[in-house]
Amino acid sequence: MIDNIALASIYRLTAVNFWESAKQLDATMEKHENGSPAKLTAIPFYFLISHAVELFLKSALLKRGFTENDLKKYDYRHNLNLLLEALQKKGVSVTPETVNMINALHLQHKNHELRYTVLLDDGKTTYWPPTSLVHPMLEELLLLTRLSTQGR
């Protein structure tokens, strides 16, 4: 079994790789005036950023005492809201903007909608925020994967 800090580093690096790939997609994505995607070709972008969110949250938790077995518990698997809540219970402060975006991404990520059923969506449940809002959220989560001098 790999130790928590090593696993946290692997999750962090994988999340950064997903985010970097998402940046490449963002650079060529057709968007509406408000910055939201204009075509279904945006699906991979939102899949990548949702998974990056999950991995950043898990990395931050591993650095604060969670174990690999804790993260494998059914309740935490792909559950962005519970991962965020667990991190906040560890005393980690998260901006309201990031909390709101994670809450909005949660269901489609947990239910694997971006992988399987997004094309069946009636346009009312899929959350595709303007990409300009996504990157600051991921930047904040990346910073939370570091430990502060107080251990939070």
Image: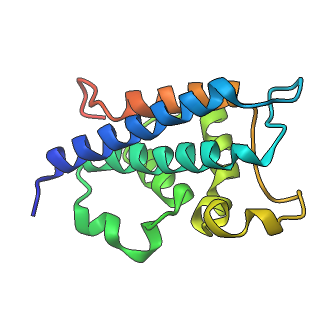
Whole-percent x, y for residue 144 in the image:
39, 33
Residue appearing at x 53%, y 46% in the figure: 48
Q: Is residue 1 left or right of residue 54?
A: left
Residue 137 falls in which quadrant of the image?
Answer: top right
Q: Nearer the viewer, residue 31 or 15?
A: 31
Residue visible at 39% across and 37% down? 17
Percent from the top left, x then y, of residue 40? 77, 48
Q: How many marks?
A: 0
Position of residue 109 relative to residue 32, above or below, is below
How is this picture coloured? Answer: rainbow
Task: In the displayed orientation, state which residue is furthest to the bottom.
Answer: 74
Residue 95 visible in the snapshot: no
Residue 70, how many percent across, how many down? 29, 66
Residue 144 in view, yes or no: yes
Task: Give the answer, above or below, for where 68 lies relative to 103.
Answer: below
Q: Nearer the viewer, residue 113 or 28?
A: 28
Q: Quadrant of the N terminus?
A: bottom left
Task: Report the quarter where the C terminus lies.
Answer: top left
Residue displayed at 68% across by 49% down: 43
Image location of residue 142, percent across then percent down? 41, 31
